[in-house]
C-alpha cells in the first residue's frame, strides 16, 4: 500500500546528441547530413559579419548541404523577427533549422519552429502545453554560456505591443542535436560574458533551491554550480579555453536542471525589468540575486550553504554578500533608473510568472515590491 506523498513521478527530456570540445562546430555538416538537406542557419549580425560562424557554414558546404542564412536576429528577439525567420524558411523551402548564436538566436529559432509547423500567431502559443508534437530537425550551437536554451523546452520572445516577454513552453522545442564549441566564445566582450555567465549560475542556483527540485535536477544543478563557480571569473577576465568549455558545459547542465525544477523569483522579477527598461536578461538577474538570496535565506538555508561550497564562495562571508561582491568583481552594475511609479506594473507582471510558485519562499505583492525597491 502506498502512502500519500511518498510517490513522485517525473520525467526528463534532453537533446539526443551532444558534441563538445574545441573545433566541434566543424562537425555541423556531418551531423546535419542525417537530419536535413536544406537547412536554414539562424544567427546574429555580429557572428555572421565577423566570420565567427564561418566554420559552421564551411562544414555545411563540405557536406553538400544547400543552406540559407538568416543573420538579423536581435537581442531579445521580437515576434516580427520570428515571423521573418518563418518567411525565409518557406521561401527557400528549407527542411531543418540550425541556430548558431546566443540565447536570443536559439529562442528565435525554437519559436520559428512553432510557427513553421503549427501556423497561426505566436501569441497563441504563449504558456505551456499549447504546441502540438512536430517533427522539424533542429540543431543548436550556443555562442554564449549562457542561457541553456540549447537544452530547455522554453523560448522567450518580446511582444513589443504588450511590452512583455512571453514564454512558450513545450518539450517539442528541445533541439535534437547540440554542439558546445568554445571557439564560438573567443573574443566575447567581457560584459556579455559576465552577464550570460551570471545567468547560467542563477539557473543552477534557482533550480537547486526550487520547490520542484528532485534528486535528478539536484544532480544536474550541483555539477553546474561546480563547473560555473570554478570558471566564471577566469572566463570573464581571460576568456581561456578550459574555462570556456566548463562554462558551456555548466550552462548546459544548468539548463537540464531548470528544465526539470523551473526557476524562481530572480527570473520572475527580471523579465519585467528587461521588458520595461531594456536591461539585459543576465544583468537584471545578477542585480536581483543578492536581494532574493536574502529574502529566501531562512527557507533555503541548507541548500544555499551547500551551493556556497560548490561555487567556491568565501567561507565566513554571507552568501548574498559574496554574490554582491562577485557582481562588483565582474563589473555587473546598475546603470538604469528604476522609477517608483513603475513598481505597480513591474509587480503585476512579475506575479504572472510561474516561477513565483517555484521559489522556496512564496512572495506576495508587497514583498515583491520591497525587492524591486532595493534596486532604486
Ligand atoms: Fe535566465
Image (cartoon, rainbow, N blue to C red):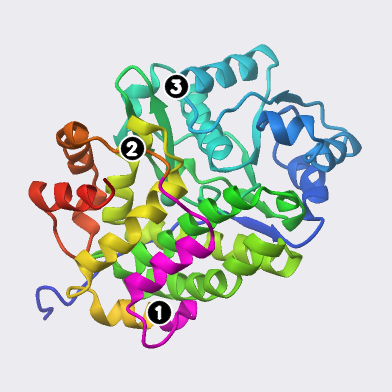
State the mark number for residue 337.
2
Above or below for 90 versus 216: above
**Mark 2 and mark 3: Cα distance apart in space:** 27 Å
Q: Is mark 1 within 8 Å of ligand 1?
A: no
Which is more toward the observer, 350 or 134? 350
Q: Position of residue 46 (x, y in %)?
A: 71, 33
**Sequence-wise first label, 2 or 3:** 3
Which is more toward the observer, 286 or 199? 286
- Seen at 45% across and 75% down, the residue is 222
Q: Which residue is mark 3?
A: 79
Q: Which residue is mark 1?
A: 308
- Seen at 42% across and 46% down, the residue is 171
Please name which of the two marks, 2 or 1, marks the residue nearer to the observer: 2
Which quarter of the image is occupied by the C terminus? Answer: top left
Q: Secondary structure at mark 3?
A: helix
**Mark 2 and mark 1: Cα distance apart in space:** 31 Å
Packing grade of label 3 (10 A; few <14, some 14-19, many >=20) is many
Q: Is mark 3 within 8 Å of ligand 1?
A: no
State the mark number for residue 326.
none
Residue 318 is a magenta residue: yes
Q: Position of residue 114 (x, y in %)?
A: 46, 28
Q: Position of residue 325 (x, y in %)?
A: 44, 68
Amino acid at each position: 500500500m502506498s502512502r500519500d506523498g511518498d510517490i513522485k513521478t517525473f520525467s526528463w527530456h534532453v537533446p539526443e546528441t551532444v558534441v563538445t570540445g574545441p573545433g566541434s562546430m566543424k562537425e555541423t555538416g556531418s551531423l546535419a547530413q542525417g537530419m536535413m538537406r536544406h537547412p536554414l542557419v539562424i544567427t546574429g549580425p555580429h557572428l555572421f559579419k565577423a566570420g565567427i560562424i564561418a566554420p559552421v557554414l564551411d562544414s555545411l558546404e563540405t557536406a553538400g548541404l544547400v543552406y540559407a542564412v538568416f543573420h538579423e536576429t536581435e537581442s531579445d528577439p521580437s515576434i516580427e523577427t520570428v515571423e521573418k525567420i518563418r518567411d525565409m524558411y518557406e521561401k527557400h523551402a528549407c527542411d531543418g533549422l540550425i541556430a548558431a548564436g546566443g540565447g536570443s538566436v536559439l529562442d528565435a529559432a525554437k519559436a520559428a519552429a512553432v510557427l513553421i509547423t503549427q501556423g497561426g500567431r505566436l501569441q497563441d502559443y504563449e504558456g505551456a502545453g499549447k504546441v502540438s508534437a512536430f517533427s522539424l530537425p533542429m540543431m543548436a550551437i550556443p555562442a554564449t554560456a549562457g542561457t541553456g536554451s540549447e537544452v530547455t523546452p522554453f523560448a522567450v520572445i518580446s511582444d513589443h505591443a504588450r511590452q512583455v516577454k512571453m514564454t512558450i513552453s513545450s518539450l517539442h522545442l528541445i533541439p535534437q542535436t547540440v554542439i558546445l564549441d568554445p571557439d564560438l566564445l573567443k573574443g566575447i566582450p567581457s560584459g556579455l560574458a559576465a552577464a550570460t555567465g551570471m545567468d547560467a549560475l542563477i539557473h543552477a542556483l534557482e533550480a537547486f533551491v526550487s520547490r520542484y527540485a528532485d534528486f535528478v535536477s539536484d544532480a544536474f544543478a550541483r555539477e553546474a554550480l561546480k563547473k560555473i563557480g570554478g570558471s566564471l571569473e577566469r572566463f570573464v577576465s581571460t576568456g581561456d579555453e578550459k574555462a570556456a568549455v566548463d562554462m558551456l558545459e555548466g550552462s548546459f547542465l544548468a539548463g537540464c536542471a531548470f528544465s526539470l525544477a523551473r526557476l524562481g523569483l530572480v527570473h520572475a522579477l527580471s523579465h519585467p525589468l528587461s521588458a520595461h527598461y531594456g536591461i539585459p536578461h543576465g544583468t537584471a538577474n545578477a542585480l536581483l540575486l543578492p536581494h532574493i538570496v536574502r529574502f529566501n535565506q531562512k527557507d533555503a538555508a541548507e541548500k544555499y550553504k551547500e551551493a556556497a561550497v560548490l561555487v567556491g564562495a568565501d567561507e565566513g562571508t554571507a552568501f548574498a554578500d559574496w554574490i554582491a561582491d562577485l557582481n562588483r568583481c565582474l563589473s555587473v552594475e546598475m546603470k538604469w533608473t528604476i522609477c517608483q511609479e513603475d513598481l505597480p506594473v513591474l509587480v503585476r507582471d512579475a506575479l504572472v510568472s510561474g516561477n513565483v510558485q517555484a521559489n522556496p519562499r512564496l512572495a506576495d505583492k508587497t514583498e515583491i515590491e520591497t525587492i524591486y525597491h532595493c534596486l532604486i
